[in-house]
Image (spheres, grey):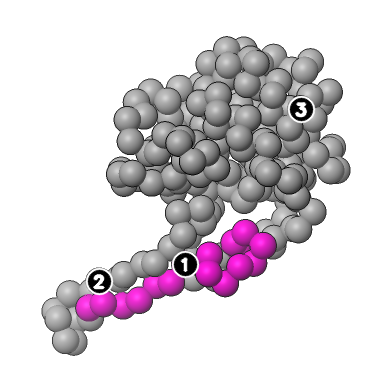
Amino acid sequence: MIIRDISMTIHPHMTVYKNKENKQPLFLKSADFETHGVYETDITMNLHTGTHIDFPLHTLKEGHNSDGHPLSTFIGTAKVFDLSQIDECISKADIEQLNIQKDDFILFKTRNSFRDDFDFNFVYLDESAAQYLANKKIRGVGIDSLGIERNQPNHPTHDTLLGAAIIILEGLRLKDISENNYEFICLPLKIAHVEALPVRAILIEK
């Protein structure tokens, strides 16, 4: 069995969305051995930092939050599709010939995985592809960028997917992952009433 970690490492100088300073994690030593006899760290971090899940409340005012999602949503088989040849965006035409079925969890590997800095022209999923996936009634979709869409007015990709109760997983690292089917686990932290949650995402090869 081979376990592939496809998560970003959280640290104070990690890559964040559009290099925004307010999305940079802040680590603060809150106790040390000299004063307290133990070592402890506080962390302040936007929930959309690093590898994370978006829930409907992220873009839909009346959307569901992090509560009530069964763990089975985040465990099962994932299909990784290599679309690293795409330069701009993933459209319906790019994915309609792929083996995508109802309840699948789909992960898209793109050229994004081959850069560690933030690329303002990252490959994203456009509205036509989002609608195609919604019509297929997949369980979730992941991508190797810190956003699943880029510069689309009124965020239609998010609204289409989240409105169809499809989980969005952003910030994957798929550089060393081949196109295949894998056992998949991406358990989010157990935090109530929020619109996004950090995850540790792994793929398992038998």
Q: Which mark is residue 115?
A: none
Q: Nearer the viewer, residue 39 or 101?
A: 101
Instruction: Name the kind of residue labelled 1 in the image.
Output: Pro
Tell me how far mark 1 sits from mark 2, CA to CA.
16 Å
- Residue at coordinates 43% horizontally, 72% vertically from top-left? 26
Tell me how far mark 3 sits from mark 1, CA to CA.
34 Å
Tell me how far mark 3 sits from mark 2, CA to CA.
47 Å
Instruction: Name the kind of residue labelled 2 in the image.
Output: Glu
Read off the residue under disc 3.
Answer: 128
Residue 50 relative to residue 120: left or right? left
Considering the numbered disc 1 on the image, is that residue within a helix, a strand or a loop? loop
Q: Residue furthest front?
A: 62
Read off the residue under disc 2.
Answer: 40
- Residue at coordinates 67% horizontally, 42% vertically from top-left? 155
Q: Is residue 128 above or below residue 147?
A: above
Q: Position of residue 178 (x, y in %)?
A: 67, 32
